[in-house]
Amino acid sequence: MLIWLLAGMGVFLLNVYLPAALFFPAMGLKIHAGSRDELPEPSKMVRRARRTLANFQENFTIFLALGILAMVVENADMSLAVLGAQIFVFARVAFIICYMISIPFTRSIAFTVGFIGMGMMAYALI
């Protein structure tokens, strides 16, 4: 389980830095190093990256809590919890990619699959 929690953190960190990495070329070094009082309008890709991050922030704390609980609760079904964590991590990667390249229904499916993964993690605790 710990490996998959760390993998989830890795995907989360990549998602945290994605909007800044996409926005940096538009800002340039001078603006980035300054006070950033007046920023240029973010591109469509930067706005998408920010929305994927906001969505990930809403789900990541629940994922972490369920993963930690699965490691702590004595009678937890660890194989089901790990499978749910794996599904969540891979679904989040798919969600970010589908959102960034604007595949409407596929990103919704990826989100739902990730949500099911968290549901499996929760069910493993019962």
Image (spheres, rainbow, N blue to C red):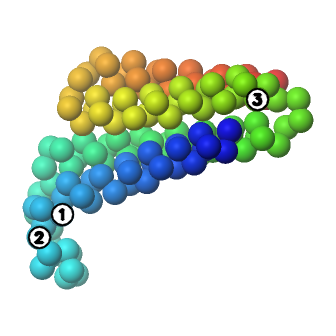
Residue type at mark 1? Phe
Kindly report the distance in space between the C-alpha atoms of the residues bearing marks 3 and 2.
47 Å
* Quarter of the image where one finds residue 105: top left
Q: Secondary structure at mark 2?
A: helix
* Quarter of the image where one finds residue 104: top left
Residue depth check, mark 3 versus mark 2: number of the one nearer the observer: 3
Position of the C terminus by quadrant: top right
Q: Is residue 68 above or below residue 19?
A: above
Outermost front residue: 3
Which disc is residue 28 wearing? 2
Q: Label 3, on which residue?
A: 78
Residue 13 located left or right of residue 104: right
Q: Secondary structure at mark 3?
A: helix
Residue 103 located left or right of residue 70: left
User: Is there a contact, CB below 8 Å, between mark 1 and mark 2?
Assistant: yes
Outermost bottom residue: 34
Residue at (79, 25) in percent of width and height: 77
Which residue is more in the foreground, 90 or 57? 90
Q: Which is nearer the N-term, disc 3 or disc 2?
A: 2
Residue at (37, 31) in percent of width and height: 95
Outermost right residue: 74
Q: Secondary structure at mark 1?
A: helix
Position of the N terminus by quadrant: top right
Q: Label 1, on which residue?
A: 24
Residue 79 located left or right of residue 58: right
Residue type at mark 3? Met
Residue at (44, 45) in percent of width and height: 11
Residue type at mark 2? Gly
Which residue is more in the foreground, 95 or 48? 95
Residue 65 in view: no
* Residue 64 percent coordinates (x, y): 63, 44
